[in-house]
Amino acid sequence: MAPPLGPKRCAAGDPVWRAVVHGLAHDLRVPPTDMLALAGLYRAGALAGPAFTAQVVAHAREALNRVDELGCLIEEAVHSYCREPIDLAALVAGCVDAAWSAADEAGVILHCQALPTVAWVEGDARMLEMAVTRLLARAILNSSPGAAVHLRIGISGRACSVEVATAAASPDEVVAALTRSTPAGMFVRRVMRCHRGKLTLGKERGAAIWRLVLPQSKKAPEGAFLPLVR
């Protein structure tokens, strides 16, 4: 069996539990509270029906996304990491395929640049898939209808990177969604730390950009380039 990537950190003083408690006590209350306020405006005639519907849908999506982010944080805290060779290009392609329906529903264009044939890293497939999925979900959620979310994989020297960029109306708000104090930001950083990688946040030419940077595997797994038997 492959060796674990890192020790488990689920003691009572673990900051993940403090984040979960804060999320349950505050973050999950924000969207429903906003919906109630919108309902009051609608009943008072201060908000038209279409605008009311659009804003309620947006708050509902935010609430569901926060639940998913807290769920990822809890799962990571008790997950037993295992090291195995992973084709990062194939993993990202699967995440993009799974995100198409959410992007289409939100009216967001999901654009994936040509992926490399292979990009080998060593790590835990489950956690890396969840990290990429959370980046895509957040980028889609924080993008305006008609905006595009761009995803690409970069290979430079001994590192592989997964880059998610979106030209949102408020790039600062998008970047803030993955700061160290948010459940999503904490989750992704914990995953990256266990893979000896990092998460970087930034803005370039009006676009918010998130990057997962991982050490590239020194060699492909045995048999990776053998022809398929048909």
Image: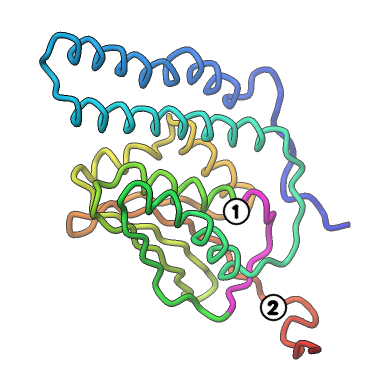
Question: Is residue 41 within the magenta segment?
Answer: no
State the quadrant of the N terminus: bottom right
Task: Estimate the x, y position of residue 215 in percent, counting from the top left.
Answer: 58, 64
Specify start and end residues of the magenta stretch as a single range: 118-127
Mark 1 or mark 2: which comes first in sequence? 1
Estimate how packed mark 1 is, as few (under 14), some (14 to 19) or many (20 or more) residues with alpha carbons within 10 Å.
Answer: some
For image coordinates 80% across by 80% down, the residue present is 222
In the image, residue 61 sits, relative to residue 151, either above or below, namely above
Q: Is residue 74 left or right of residue 208?
A: right
Q: Foreground residue, 6 or 147?
A: 147
Task: Estimate the x, y position of residue 136 in percent, counting from the top left.
Answer: 44, 51
Q: Amino acid at mark 2?
A: Lys
In the image, residue 176 sits, relative to residue 200, either above or below, namely above
For image coordinates 32% across by 37% down, the residue present is 176
In which quadrant of the rendered view does residue 28 lie? top left
In which quadrant of the rendered view does residue 172 lie? top left
Q: Amino acid at mark 1?
A: Glu
> Which residue in the structure is indicated by mark 1?
129
Q: Is residue 7 left or right of residue 207?
A: right
Task: Estimate the x, y position of residue 202 in percent, counting from the top left.
Answer: 30, 51
For image coordinates 72% across by 45% down, the residue present is 6
For image coordinates 49% across by 31% down, the residue present is 183
Q: Nearer the viewer, mark 1 or mark 2?
A: 1
Q: SS of the residue at dot 1?
A: helix
Q: Foreground residue, 51 or 121?
A: 51
Question: Is residue 119 within the magenta segment?
Answer: yes
| Residue 219: mark in rendering | 2
